[in-house]
Amino acid sequence: MDVEDIGAFEAKTRLSELLEQVRRGRVFRITRRGKPVAELRPVAEGPRRPRFGSDRGRVAMRDDFDAPLDDMKAYR
């Protein structure tokens, strides 16, 4: 990931634009008098907990899903 240096004054005046670029994955190193003081980068999101019912309509179960399989006759 390429890091682009940007001065503190410029970062302050273009903050909204920079935040939009950060949302898309860009990283900026904010400098003051040429020395790095901070980084502006996307927040790493942790795994989200699945919401109940979020797969409704995506999974279909056939009427005979629990019917005996012909291949398993020898084991019954």
Image (cartoon, helix red, strand yellow):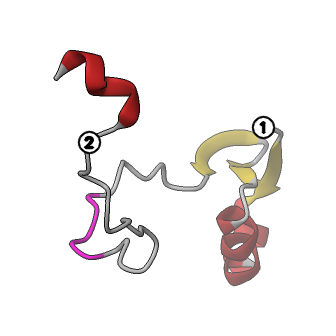
> In the drawing, does residue 34 fall left or right of residue 45?
right
Residue 37 % position (x, y): 59, 44
Residue 12 % position (x, y): 67, 75
| Quarter placement of the N terminus | top right
Q: Residue furthest top?
A: 74
16 is higher (above) or lower (below) than 51: below
Answer whether residue 9 is visible to the viewer in this image. Answer: no
Q: Nearer the viewer, residue 60 or 30?
A: 60
Residue span colored magenta: 49-53
Q: Which residue is mark 1?
A: 1
Answer whether residue 76 is visible to the viewer in this image. Answer: yes
Mark 2–mark 1 contact, CB under 8 Å? Answer: no
Q: Amino acid at mark 1?
A: Met
Q: Residues within 10 Å of mark 1 (few under 14, many from 20)?
A: few
Which mark's residue is nearer the viewer, 2 or 1? 2
54 is higher (above) or lower (below) than 75: below
Look at 79% across and 70% down and name the residue there.
10
Q: Residue furthest left?
A: 76
Q: Between disc 2 and disc 1, whose residue precedes?
A: 1
Residue 14 % position (x, y): 76, 79
> In the drawing, does residue 55 fall left or right of residue 33?
left
- Label 1 sits on a secondary structure element that is loop
Q: Nearer the viewer, residue 43 or 5?
A: 43
Look at 72% across and 50% down and name the residue there.
27
Q: Nearer the viewer, residue 28 or 76?
A: 76
Q: Amino acid at mark 2?
A: Pro
Q: Which residue is mark 2?
A: 68
Look at 35% across and 78% down and name the residue there.
56
70 is higher (above) or lower (below) than 11: above
Q: CA distance from mark 2 to mark 1?
A: 54 Å
| Quarter placement of the C terminus | top left
